[in-house]
Image (cartoon, rainbow, N blue to C red):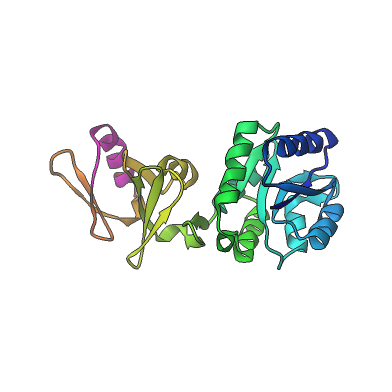
Amino acid sequence: MKALIIEDEQKSREMLATLIKKNFSDIALVGEAKNVAEGVDLIKTLHPDLVFLDISMPDGTGFDVLEKVQGLKFEIIFTTATDKHALKAIKYSACDYLLKPIDIEELKVAIEKVLSKKSNSMPSMENLQFLIQNLKRADDNYSKITLPTGNAYEIVNIKDIIRCEADGSYTNFFLTGAKKLMVSASLKHYEDLLPANDFIRIHHHHLINMNHVVRFLKVDGGYAIMSDNSQLEISRRKKDAFLERLNAV
């Protein structure tokens, strides 16, 4: 796998290059760039399989790079410091990222994910365009989210998510139209990511969209009846918070 680093800080660039060369024999580091212009030129010339892409650079951002190389396919691992707006957009787009300074164990996890993917599971240009659009927004109130389903990236409307159910380290998404998606991320990940005004955890297995609750069933500890006719148990310690939110809808 051919890899390219686009990073404006020389020390960060050298450190990442050293980590890759020492720990990943499956990756050939074919080039390094220190700004947007150099990065774009190297991507077009070298056609890398993987790009480590810094977010903030002197002549623009990593997202400017993506806009200038649309049509070329490669895996991306973003590298960033503490740009919260960019991080949220990246998470909503199901892209991988590393926080600087880069931790070797986190780097290993990110690279192993890339190496284990099939070529048809690379983020589509539609998904990257979705990411770029989110980054151009003035706020973090996104209407769509990308869900990685193993061999594809599904972009879905948040309002169409009825409920999410834990399945080990995976999450099942139940959408309007009787559509179901299994996603390779934990329920806790989506509890933290989806808008708290709409979504609430009612059980260690269930995260629900309050806009799809049709009634509350007062049996045993209580059940939420959803718009897809599912009947979900509400844990005793979540019941008060659920009823408070239900009364506020």
Q: From this viewpoint, is residue 228 visible?
A: yes
Residue drawn where x is 15% and y is 44% of the image: 218
* Quarter residue 70 falls in: bottom right
Q: Is residue 178 above or below residue 64?
A: below
Q: Position of residue 68 (x, y in %)?
A: 78, 62
Q: Position of residue 145 (x, y in %)?
A: 51, 56
* Quarter residue 202 falls in: top left
Q: From this viewpoint, is residue 84 visible?
A: no
Task: Return the residue nearer the eye: 2 or 80.
Answer: 2
Q: Is residue 100 above or below residue 162?
A: above
Magenta extent = 232-246
Q: Is residue 242 left or right of residue 161?
A: left
Q: Residue furthest front?
A: 25
Task: Return the residue nearer the eye: 226 or 211.
Answer: 226
Q: Is residue 160 left or right of residue 25?
A: left
Q: Is residue 218 left or right of residue 112?
A: left
Q: Position of residue 142 (x, y in %)?
A: 55, 54
234 within the magenta span: yes
Q: Position of residue 71 (x, y in %)?
A: 71, 68
130 within the magenta span: no
Task: Return the residue nearer the eye: 97 or 231.
Answer: 97
